Every structure is written in C-alpha cells, then in structure tokens.
C-alpha cells in the first residue's frame, strides 16, 4: 500500500513511554488506525482499519497483533482461505529479543528480535510531532471541553518541498495522561496532556511529473485504555517472568 507523503515523513523512532507501573500491575492500551488504500493512478479505493493492543507491566511489553492470511492454488490462483489472524509478542525493554506466540505457524513460542518483529508494525513508529517539523503549520482554532477534560486543536499545514497541504485536528485528554503509549512524547510534554486522537487530511493536489491528481486523503488515529485485562494476557506476563 502506498503511503501518504506526510506519513512517510513520520519518524520511525519508538514512541512508547516507559510505564511506571509495578511489576505485577498491567496497563493496556488499544491503538486504532484508519489508513487509505490506493488503486491505479494513486486513487483512493478505501480505508484499512487496524487495531493494536499493547500491554505494559514494569519493563515488559506485550503486543497483541493481527495480520491477513491468504491461501490460494498456485496454478489457478483460486483462494482457499482468507482470514485475519492474531498473535502475541512479549519482550523486556532491556533485551533485544522477545518471544512470539503464533500457533498458526509453530506450536511453541519462538524467540525473535524485537526490532525485526516490530519493524513492519505501524503502532510503534508513529510520531505525529514530525507534522510540525517537516511542514509549515498554522493554528486555526482551539476547542476545550472542561467537563470531558479534552482540548482539540485544528491546524493547517503546507509542505514546501512537495506542495502537499491540508489540515489536521489533534485531540488531547487530561484524564488519560497515565497511558504509557504515545503518538508523540514531544506533544504530550508540551501540552501536559495525552494526545489521544488525530485526524490528518491532505487536500487534492496535481502532480506535474505524472500528470495525475492525487485524491484527498485522510488518516485517523485514536487510543483508549483497555479496561479489562484478558486472562491469557495475565498468564503470558506470569510465564515470561518465570523465564527471567
């Protein structure tokens, strides 16, 4: 899937803030993304929705990840199976290795490098602060809801190199500052709130090099706490602690 220009500009640094929970406490965060899918001539054909669940306990991190699996006949191309599958990956932040639990491919856990397994995952690589470092931005409006403890800021942005332009809406919450996941450590620190949702809209633009017009493109991000920790997550943390 082609990436938006401004998504390509997002830095790939890990934006997870270390959790301050004790070794037995588990904090869960659900991270949602809606990203565009492209067809011929960069036309938007739809939007792909994805959710990552990330759990924190002391220095341990547990990702509940998903992927699409397709099986088809090598000769005719006929599909036998197409489904969304899930697996867990757990590691200690002091280690370069963790364990992948994917029963679809192997019956037991498999040792894997953290950077290799998370390399193709979108949730660890989002840093929305880069929208301010690679673009010229202008604050258009601010809306506060004191009862809900939220602030929403609307900005326009222009990239002088690619001429991409549009607007973004960033939502902050004062009630979710304890959540360890971050879309931007810099913005969380500046606002002293948690950036919990973002809407990025790139306006249509003409590309002289290809003679095509790129559609208006939207990308959405949202996070929320996981209120109930699944028993299998608790067990994976307990099992991993016994290995250490």
Image: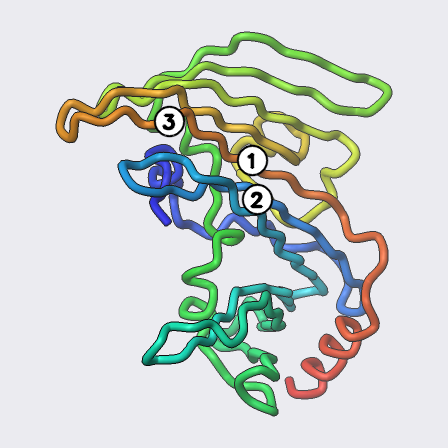
Horizontal and vertical percent position of residue 162: 24, 25
Alpha-carbon span between mark 3 and mark 2:
19 Å
Residue 204 lies, in percent from the top left, at: 36, 20
Task: Identify the residue shown where x is 79% and y is 24%.
Answer: 149
Camera-nearest label, 3 or 2 = 3
Closer to the N terminus: mark 3 or mark 2?
A: 2
Element type at mark 1: strand
On the image, the x and y values in percent for residue 230 come to 81, 67
Picture residue at 55% right of the left edge, 67% below the top: 93
Q: Earlier in the sequence, mark 1 or mark 2?
A: 2
Q: Residues within 10 Å of mark 2 (few under 14, many from 20)?
A: many
Which element is circle 3 on? loop
Label ID, residue 220: 1
Taking the spot 37% from the left edge, 37% from the top edge, the residue there is 4
Q: Label 2's element?
A: strand
Q: Which residue is mark 3?
A: 215
Q: CA distance from mark 1 to mark 2?
A: 6 Å
Residue at label 2? 33
Counting residues from the N terminus, which is met first, the one under dot 1 or under dot 3?
3
Image quarter of residue 104: bottom right
Label 3: few (<14), some (14–19) or many (≥20) C-alpha neighbours in 10 Å = some
| Callout 1 touching callout 2 (CB < 8 Å) | yes
Residue sitting farthest toward the front: 76
Residue 80 horizontal side relative to residue 237, left or right: left
């Amino acid at each position: 899937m082609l990436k938006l220009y401004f998504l390509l500009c997002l830095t790939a640094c890990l934006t997870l803030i270390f959790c301050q929970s004790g070794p037995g406490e588990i904090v869960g965060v659900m991270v949602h993304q809606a990203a565009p899918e492209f067809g011929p001539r960069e036309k938007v054909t739809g939007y792909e929705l994805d959710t990552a669940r990330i759990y924190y306990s002391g220095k341990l991190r547990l990702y509940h990840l998903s992927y699409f699996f397709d099986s088809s006949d090598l000769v005719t191309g006929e599909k036998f199976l197409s489904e969304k599958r899930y697996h867990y990956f757990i590691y200690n932040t002091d280690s370069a290795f963790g364990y992948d639990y994917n029963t679809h491919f192997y019956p037991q856990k498999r040792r894997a490098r953290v950077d290799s397994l998370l390399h193709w995952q979108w949730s660890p690589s989002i840093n929305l602060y880069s929208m301010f470092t690679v673009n010229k931005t202008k604050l258009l409006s601010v809306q506060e809801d004191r009862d809900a403890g939220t602030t929403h800021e609307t900005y326009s942005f222009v990239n002088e190199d690619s001429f991409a332009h549009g607007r973004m809406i960033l939502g902050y919450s004062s009630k979710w500052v304890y959540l360890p996941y971050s879309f931007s450590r810099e913005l969380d620190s500046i606002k002293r709130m948690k950036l919990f949702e973002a809407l990025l809209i790139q306006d249509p633009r003409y590309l002289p090099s290809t003679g095509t017009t790129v559609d208006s493109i939207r990308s959405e991000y949202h996070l929320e706490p996981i209120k109930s920790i699944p028993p299998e997550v608790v067990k994976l943390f307990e099992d991993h602690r016994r290995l250490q």
